[in-house]
Amino acid sequence: MNPGRIDLHVHTTASDGTLTPAETVREAVARGVRLLGITDHDCTDGIPEALDAAEELEITLVPGVELSVGSDETEVHVLAYFMDIADAALQEALAKLRGARDVRNERILARLRELGARLDMARVRQIAGDGSVGRPHIAKALVEAGHVSSEGAAFRRYLARGKPAYVGRERLGPAEASNLIRDTGGIPVLAHPAKIGPRLAIEGIIDQGMAGVEVFHSDHDAKDVELLMKIARERGLLITGGTDSHGPHSDRPRLIGSLDIPEWVGEELLARAPRCWTEQR
Ligand SMILES: [Zn+2]
Ligand SMILES: [Zn+2]
């Protein structure tokens, strides 16, 4: 009926989006969105600015965040809505998540140095470009520096789990993440579950305390939507949706509000908003 009027998954410059929070809100309004969720990666810094802009422009803004949780092999994203962004435990956990990658990369390079394979972090960052630095970039740097013959060899010799330069990532698991979100008044929602794999894997994560499932997402096809809707309905879970827009100048531009998300999705989310939030409005 009102296509594109809801978008509950949008990134800003507070993480890896290309529009500032205020610009994001203006763009959403210009594109006819009436209910907007700001969900930056492991960061809620954009929310106050977005709330201010939303108040001026008469659009409903849902405070959110997208947590990176799980292990390297099974990285999972969990969206949180309506959590208390002033909560100290939440902010401490977010700071840890943001720092986890940097600390880990430094530790990997230190191990490699001990093993005689010296790399320059600045070069690794260059290889990663705009993306966040990870093991694949370290593998490329190892090849470039002549320490190994291929990226595969870099993993087999140094970087894979159990190899001498492997450093585990200390991160929250999905269950810890959903507890943290609930403890701070938020609603934990499994983000873009189709990326996780088969139904069994998706359900395994949902059963770790998720209250909702992101059924509508730019990367989901009709079949994904159908399956996820079924899973959500069977378990009585909240259904959400968003474009995962990172702004118009990102490498995969998805326009805010460009997904056809039914109106009831927004109504059901707002019905679960904490009372303190409803009272402010
Ligand atoms: Zn994500
Ligand atoms: Zn996202």
Image: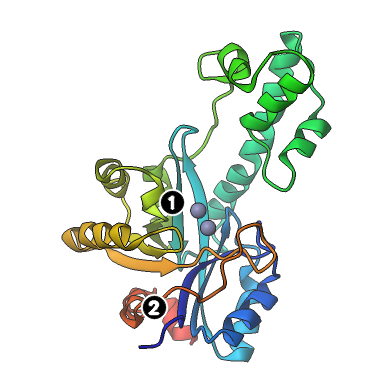
Q: Is residue 179 visible?
A: no
Find residue 154 and report its horizontal and vertical position in percent.
Answer: 63, 17
Q: Amino acid at mark 2?
A: Arg
* Above or below for 180 versus 63: above
Q: Which residue is mark 2?
A: 275
Question: Gap between marks 2 and 1, in whole Å?
Answer: 19 Å
Which residue is depicted at the point 81% across and 32% down? 123
Find residue 77 and report its horizontal and vertical position in percent.
Answer: 46, 50
Q: Amino acid at mark 1?
A: Leu
Using the rendered view, name the quadrant where residue 19 is placed. Answer: bottom right
Query: Between 237 and 45, which is closer to the camera in this rendering?
Result: 237
Badge 1 crowding class, 10 Å Cα cut-off, few under 14, some 14 to 19, many 20 or more, is many
Query: Between 181 and 248, which is closer to the camera in this rendering?
Result: 248
Using the rendered view, name the quadrant where residue 153 is placed. Answer: top right
Q: Is mark 1 within 8 Å of ligand 1?
A: no
Find residue 90 and report its horizontal and vertical position in percent.
Answer: 53, 54
Which residue is depicted at the point 65% across and 57% down? 251
Find residue 57 and report its horizontal and vertical position in percent.
Answer: 61, 90
Q: Is residue 185 left or right of residue 111?
A: left
Badge 2 crowding class, 10 Å Cα cut-off, few under 14, some 14 to 19, many 20 or more, is few
Q: Is residue 180 visible?
A: yes
Query: Earlier along the polypeptide chain: callout 2 or callout 1?
Result: 1
Query: Between 129 and 104, which is closer to the camera in this rendering?
Result: 129
Mark carried by residue 180: 1
Which residue is depicted at the point 68% across and 14% down? 149
Which residue is depicted at the point 39% across and 44% down? 174
Q: Quadrant of the N terminus?
A: bottom left
Q: Secondary structure at mark 2?
A: helix
Query: Between 82 and 13, which is closer to the camera in this rendering?
Result: 13
